[in-house]
Amino acid sequence: MVPFLRYSVLLMLLLGYTMGVAAQKDSVVQLYGVVMTADSLEGLEGVSVSIVGKGRGTISNYQGVFSIAALKGDEVEFSYIGFKSKRVVIPRTLEGTEFSVIQLLTSDDNYLPATVIRPKPSRQQFERDFLNSQVPNDEYELARQNTEQNKRLAMMRILPNDGREAVNYALRQTANRATYAGQLPPQNILNPFAWQQFIKAWKRGDFKSKR
């Protein structure tokens, strides 16, 4: 009796899993279509087409055409710089496995500030405006202090590297490893130039405690 119950439970679990997979497969649809401007009906290239909350998406090609796999009931968002975003929900009652859409996007004035085009100033105009500009004394004094050598050296020791410096350092390390691959790197303890740099750094106080 026990083996019969065991096989019955196993059969029920297998049947439930099969039905779940079939239902999941039936809910998958291929969403395709084209994104165009609402005023001129021109295809928009590079429109972001994403499934909300799923972390999946694609972009439209140079004609505004896109294609993406989704599930029935998913919410699809169309976003593009300079245009208002639009969300569309795929109907759960959709029959079949394909769903097409023609999405129109309207321009968003919030992304398009007024642009003022002026002629390029001449050298004389630039010198005149620069010399006549009034700089407050406190800002002038602050700029003068920031350019002092001692302050720049102190800031260089305490401030972290920016993105460009970090990338350059990583590239130099990679180049050094590739240069001395398969051999021992040179020992700077016998390098007179390294000792010269060490003595200069010691005189500057680079090895002092920063507390």
Image (cartoon, helix red, strand yellow):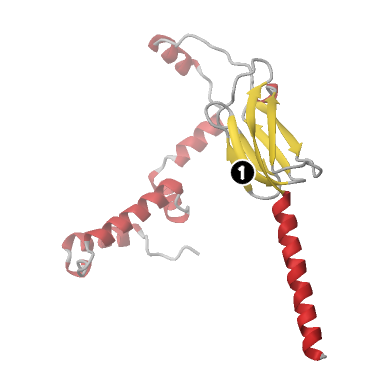
Residue 140 seen in the figure: yes
In the rendered structure, the answer to whether residue 141 lies left or right of residue 8 reads left
Examine the rendered structure and indicate whether residue 72 appears above or below residue 20: above
Name which residue lies at 41% across and 42% down. 148
Name which residue lies at 72% across and 51% down. 26
Image-quadrant location for residue 115: top right
Q: Which of 124 and 50 is in front in this view?
A: 50
Q: In which quarter of the image is the N terminus?
A: bottom right
Examine the rendered structure and indicate whether residue 130 appears above or below residue 209: above
Image-quadrant location for residue 102: top right
Name which residue lies at 17% across and 64% down. 191
Number of marks in the rendered image: 1
Give how far across and how far down residue 162 sits, in percent.
Answer: 46, 48
Residue 153 seen in the figure: no
Q: Is mark 1 on a helix, strand or loop?
A: strand
Q: Mark 1 points at which residue?
A: 57
Examine the rendered structure and indicate whether residue 65 appears above or below residue 1: above
Give how far across and how far down residue 30 sits, in percent.
Answer: 65, 42
Q: Nearer the viewer, residue 98 or 57?
A: 98
Q: Nearer the viewer, residue 156 or 163?
A: 163
Question: What amino acid is at disc 1?
Answer: Gly
Q: Label 1 neighbourhood size at 10 Å, few (<14), some (14-19), many (20+)?
A: some
Give how far across and how far down residue 136 sits, in percent.
Answer: 56, 27
State the residue lying farthest toward the bottom: 1
Name which residue lies at 22% across and 59% down. 179
